[in-house]
Image (tube, rainbow, N blue to C red):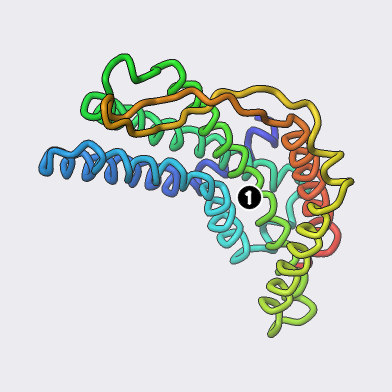
Amino acid sequence: MSPWIGLLKKEWRISKLWIFTTVGIVIAVNIVAYLLSLKYDEPITMFVPSLIVTCLHAFYMLMFMALSLQTEAKRLHLWLHTPQPAFRLVSAKLIIAFGSMLVSLFVSALFTYIASLGIKERYFHEKMWNHELFIESGALAALSIALLSIHLAVLFLLYWVIYRICKQMIPKMAWLAVTLAYFLIGWLFLSFMQTDVYEWLTEWGKVAVPGAVFKYDAAEGWIMIEKMETMPIGVIVFYGIMDVLVFCASVWLIGRKVEV
């Protein structure tokens, strides 16, 4: 068995309770919401909680990494004193986090889709509901949630590394230093977003994507309207490259600066 596969199996063993628990919570919330929708004869009672749970998956990988790294912090000398490089140690966590997030997101999105069918039957005439458009919009939303989840997890990794370094240098003020670093980095990036350079890097490769708009008409009731929007590919490429660079910097700092 290769060391890489061994690391993935190890991450699965220490994380499977979290993985099963999150899927169980998703199922439990949707079942309770479904029972309430039957009790009150209102499909929105299921749809809204289901949609909220699906959107909360944007924070799934962040929470996964927080719990996993906290577990490793209790035995940091064992985790870092291995023949495996920091790149493999951290990327194994991200891969398991991503895979489990996809499973949980799929289950949650499936419940949201089922809940939407109740909304359709109650509030929409058949001709006012574009099923293909709804699926396409939902798929794009799920993709956005997954990408945001990766982005937040990578950023959390950076701040965790900063915290570990500060804890070595100024143990009593580590959290304050991380908080200041968070606001400083955020301020610098927000300032950068207002520049022409940021616009040049992100506002290219615009493609049309389908979007659904819901409006209420007194005569027809609720209507689903297709609204084509443009999405620049440059944004995805820019943040993708930024996440790779932040990940590489974090891994380098773990290997060079984090002491045990």
Give percent across and percent down for residue 100: 50, 38
Q: Taking the image as drawn, is residue 164 in sight?
A: no
Looking at the image, is 75 positioned above or below residue 201? below
Residue in the foreground of this view, choosing between 183 and 169 = 183
Q: Position of residue 231 (x, y in %)?
A: 68, 30
| Image quadrant assignment for residue 229 | top right
Side of 138 relative to 162 (left or right): left
**Which residue shows up at 33% across the image and 47% down it?**
25
Residue shown at the point (46%, 33%) measured from the top left: 103
Res 116 visible: yes
Which residue corresponds to mark 1? 153
For residue 256, above or below residue 24: below
Residue 46 relative to residue 52: left or right? left
Task: Name the quadrant of the C terminus.
Answer: bottom right
Residue 5 in percent (x, y) is at 64, 33
In the image, 1: left or right of 51? Answer: right
Q: Quadrant of residue 30?
A: top left
Observer-nearest residue: 17 or 201? 201
Question: Residue 118's spot in the image, x, y percent?
Answer: 24, 29
Q: Residue at x 68, y 62 (%)?
A: 160
Q: Residue at position x 57%, y 44% from top?
A: 11
* Quadrant in which the N terminus is drawn: top right
Specify the farthest residue to the right.
Answer: 197
**Element at label 1:** helix
